[in-house]
Amino acid sequence: MHDPRGGHLARRVNGPGPVEYADGDEASAFAQMLGGLIEANVTGRPEKRKDFDGLKARVGIFVTDIGEGVTLEFGGGHLVVRNGLQPGRDVTIRADADTVMQLSNVRIGFAGMPNYFDATGRQVAGRMLKGQLKIEGLVGNLTTLNQVTRVFSVAE
Amino acid sequence: MAVAAFSPEWAQAFKDEINKSPVYRDAGKGWKWTVGLVVEAEPDKNFPDSRGVVMDLFEGEARDIRVGTAEDAQACDIVISGTYSRWKQVATKELDATRGMLQGKLKLKGDLPTVVRYTKASQEMTECTTRVAVIWPDE
């Protein structure tokens, strides 16, 4: 798991930073990793901060091969990360660990749209077609999903 | 020839495997950070003292891999820690390193976006460890 007390990502588990963990010290390793990733992205890259500040949605991510999920509550410049899939989600992503890692490597292309035409993008799209990546709530929430992808992506 | 787990001979064999891998050479392009693996002691597994594996990786090449103390490894840019048993599971393909980190079985310290960006390289490094024949102290 990502150690919240170390490295370039040092931050409080619960506090005034952009990311808060509803389960405090009991936050799962996966929750801390996702929260740490998003916090590093939005604090280190201004273009992602803009998306983060405008994003209001409840997003679930469930990793099928470890049987763990988290709920990300984006509240316009603030994120609460909760262990497990909580009710009232706008979008839920279900995929194995490898695919979740690939999702975070999707490049952002023209007009801020995720690029599904390069090698990584094609792999992600292929997994979706094979049912290895499932996105619930996509209809009506495409803009939200694109915003989440931009906030989540580490690709340069 | 099999080598003792986490020994200098193991480090040399691991380095050779990485440098033989065209997949790593490609996936590791752009990487310029040191990586430390902390192997925590488990006396009941005949692994009485923690060790550190210090990896100088640069642009798809393993320039140096050596075994030192846990403190040596903790001084690296990216640090991954786990018990001897966890690392043995990784090296014998019982545990996928990515899943291990997501489950908290391996602890990661360092710049997370950088690590995630090089997931493919880290997966290939794990593959390289599995190609080294190892004598495990608890077997």
Image (spheres, grey):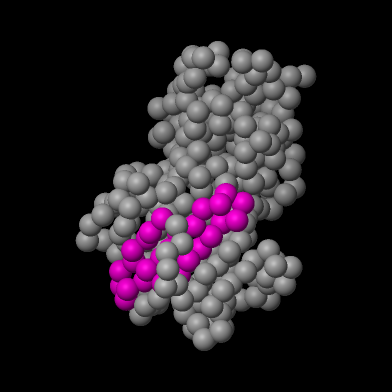
Residue at x 46%, y 52% (from the top left corner): A30
On screen, residue B72 above or below A85:
above
Question: Where residue B41 sits in the image (x, y, percent)?
Answer: 47, 21
Which stretch appears magenta?
Answer: A58-83
- Residue B137 is left or right of residue A79, and the answer is right
Nearest the camera: B120 or A129? A129
Question: Where residue A115 sits in the image (x, y, percent)?
Answer: 61, 76
On screen, residue B100 above or below A56:
above
Nearest the camera: A83 or A128? A83
Outermost residue on the right side: it is: B1
Helix, strand or loop for the magenta stretch, by majority? strand
Residue at x 54%, y 35% (from the top left corner): B55
Question: Where residue B1 sits in the image (x, y, percent)?
Answer: 77, 19
A24 in the magenta segment: no
Nearest the camera: B105 or A47? B105
A69 in the magenta segment: yes
State whether residue B86 appears in this view: yes
Residue at x 50%, y 28% (from the top left corner): B83
Question: Where residue A49 sits in the image (x, y, percent)?
Answer: 36, 72
On screen, residue B132 above or below B63:
above
Q: Quadrant of residue B74?
A: top left
State whether residue A34 appears in this view: no
